[in-house]
Amino acid sequence: MEPSFDNVIPYNDVVMRVAERIYDFLIQCPFELDPGSNWEIEAKLGRIVNKSDNERVFLPVDSETIIRGDWARENTRFDSKMGMVRDFQIKLLCILPDC
């Protein structure tokens, strides 16, 4: 983010909330964390599906957002579209010079 006119970097609520969730998870780990240990964070590609009609959920938002966990667990499921990822990888490989 660019600093504002008074040279202060604006607070990013989404980044902060994601960082807090990761921190809370690490603090509550049932095992000892080694100092300097590395952690991998995995992202999933797919879509959020409404449990009642199996249709994709379209949220009325204009930017990234965090969905409340209690609502999401009760009303939605995550539909992983790994086929989309594989298709994207194949297309990406085909546009590389060595293809």
Image (tube, rainbow, N blue to C red):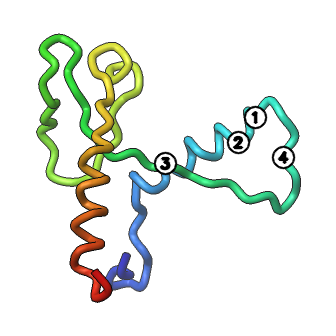
Q: Horizontal placement of 20 versus 49: left or right?
A: right
For label 1, the SS is loop
Residue 23 placement (x, y as % from top left): 65, 46
Q: Judge the density around disc 4: few (<14), some (14-19), many (≥20) Cα neighbours within 10 Å.
A: few
How packed is label 1: few (under 14 Cα within 10 Å), some, or many (20 or more)?
A: few
Mark 2 surroundings: few (<14), some (14-19) or many (≥20) residues within 10 A: some
State the CA–CA distance, disc 4 to disc 1.
8 Å
Residues at marks 2 and 1 touching, judged by CB atoms closer than 8 Å = yes
| Mark 1–mark 3 CB contact (< 8 Å) | no
Task: Return the x and y of residue 60 as percentages of the image width and height.
Answer: 12, 39
Question: Sequence-wise, which precedes: disc 1 or disc 3?
Answer: 3
Tell me the distance, in whole angstroms, between the alpha carbons under discs 2 and 3. 13 Å
Residue 28's image quarter? top right
Q: Quadrant of the N terminus?
A: bottom left
Residue 45: % across, % down:
33, 46
Q: Is residue 58 above or below residue 3?
A: above
Q: Secondary structure at mark 3?
A: helix
* Vertical order, 44 against 70 (above or below): below
Q: Nearer the viewer, residue 39 or 90?
A: 90
Which of discs 1 and 3 lies nearer the camera? The answer is: 1
> Which secondary structure, mark 4?
loop
Numbered circle sitting on residue 18? 3
Disc 4 + disc 1, Cβ < 8 Å? yes
Looking at the image, residue 95 sits to the left or right of residue 86; the answer is: left
Residue picked out by circle 4? 33
Residue 85: percent from left, percent from top = 30, 52
* Residue corresponding to mark 1: 29
Name the residue that disc number 2 marks: 26
Q: Earlier in the sequence, mark 4 or mark 2?
A: 2
SS at mark 2 in the image: helix
